[in-house]
Image: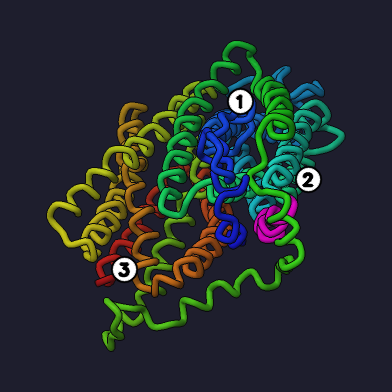
Amino acid sequence: MSHSGYDSQEATENSPLLLGESIDTTNQEPLKSSCIDNFRKPHVLWMIVFSFTLSTIMTSIIAPLVQIVLDIVCLEYYEVNDNYMNSTDIFSNLIEKDCKLPQIFALASNRLMLYQMCLYVSATLSIGYLSTLSDFKGRKFVYRISIIGIILACSIVILMSHYWRILGSNFLFIGAIIEGLLGGVIAINTACHAYISDCTKPENRSVGFGFMHASAYCGMSLGPVLGGIIVEATGSALSVFYVVVCALSIFFIFASFILPESLPPELRHQNESSASLPSPIYIFSALIILNQTPVYSGSITNNIWKRNVLYILSIIYFIYRISQAGQNDIIALYTTRKFGWTTLENGFFFTLQALTRFMALLVLLPLFRLLQGKYLTSYSRTLDLVMMRTGLIMEIVGFALYAIAINPNMFYFACVVNSLATIATPAIRTLFTIFVLPTQAGQILGALSVIEGVGSILSPLFLNSLYSWSVIKGLDEIVFWANSCLFVLASFLAFLVL
């Protein structure tokens, strides 16, 4: 994204985006902007509202989607085996005990795996194109097209639920592909960061990003419970999708007609004349920077571990994404089978998860930074190393506690421990930027995005396949032990980063 236009226009309509006044350059008195004019200006506050609302809407369908897939797979299983189910409505004649068979949970896990993979693969192919397109079509263009994709995906879930015998559960994957190709939440998130970059100065940008992420976690803590309440009130998981389609339609109107565009028309025309749209075949080119020798306080090192520190950090972050991206679907299936949790109870769990992560970033992270400023030099990486290692060790303990939890209270405690481990994520990102030149920060974060994308694609393939196999064997907990072992490897590698 180009910001040169702001540098060359010192006191134009593009520069005072965060101010409440328009300044007349002819030595006249400042002209006060009307309330409507101020309302129509791009501002970080728009993204706080935007992020909170979208996070609330999207997290409300996590547990209901798992329940719907489980119900449909249950119906298909008995349809194939003994024609036990005769209704075309997935919420009629479903007897709970008949859907607790290991074979049904294994099939549901495979369906969810394919759904997530279709979504992430298609989104990975389109995200670069849409991100560049937003530089000369505007941020609102990406919002509109991505929201349409999510609405279509939710509509396909509703359609398939009513006509599952005709369409089959595989029809669900079409919705995932459509959502991914139109950007989905991933493209919206990228456009939100670009929106904040458009209307803030570089020195204030990280604060704006922090506010946006905090508002997203607030929405994530509210959404799952809201979805569970709707299911309890209506007796149907499908009702959540009707509500979400309506909410997203209103959200589309908001993004189209109320939200102000952050990218001025002149900059869009400038970008359009100079930008070239990326091709998916170059998606891995960002990883080239990992080949360079890392920088240690401006000097080059001959130590073998220090020389390969970027690769070590890449493996650590890849392990992190492998274990995290597909985790919630597995947890929802596991708790439904082991503890008999409903959609509402799973909603409470995901709310606790989001709140704990929010508190970790809002309280623990600033506290650690305060300690760094008081006891360490500004150039020390000791704190980031400690945070990374501590977070990874907490992941080991958290997943082990998941595996040995014999009641819901123990499982909730494991959730808190596992969620507090999120302090490792910003530390890993910071370490990536420390070991390259300041001018290469954008490149290394681009490589990190590629690693994150590939990990998100492979995560459901690994976790869901493992759960499908283990549930048939009566060893449901193996998926948590496997994650714990992965973080043992990650923790060992973390101590090699010096």
Q: Position of residue 213 (x, y in %)?
A: 46, 41
Say whether residue 289 is left or right of residue 412. Answer: right
Name which of mark 3 and mark 2 comes first in the sequence.
2
Q: Residue furthest toward the left?
A: 375
Q: Main secondary structure of the magenta part?
A: helix
Residue at 41% across, 54% down: 482
Q: Which residue is mark 1?
A: 34
Q: Is residue 411 visible?
A: yes
Q: Residues within 10 Å of mark 3 (few under 14, many from 20)?
A: some
- Report if residue 237 lies within the magenta region: no
Residue 187 sits above or below residue 379 on the image? above
- Looking at the rendered structure, the kind of residue marked 3 is Leu
Q: Residue at x 43, y 37 (%)?
A: 214
Question: Going by the picture, which residue comes out furthest to the top?
Answer: 233
> Could you tell me residue 349's position as x and y percent?
43, 29
Extreme residue in the bottom direction: 302
Q: Amino acid at mark 2?
A: Ile
Dot 1: few (<14), some (14–19), or many (≥20) neighbours within 10 Å? few
Badge 2 marks a residue whose secondary structure is helix
Please identify the quarter of the rendering in which residue 228 is found. Answer: top right
On screen, residue 109 above or below 308: above
- Label 1 sits on a secondary structure element that is loop
x, y (%) of residue 387? 26, 54
Give the label, 1 or 2, closer to the camera: 1
Q: Circle 3 sits on which residue? A: 493
Q: What is the residue that sits farthest to the right in this orientation?
A: 166
Question: Residue at 49% across / 36% down in the picture?
Answer: 216
C-alpha span from label 1 to label 3: 57 Å
* Range of magenta residues: 121-137
| Residue at which label 2 appears | 174
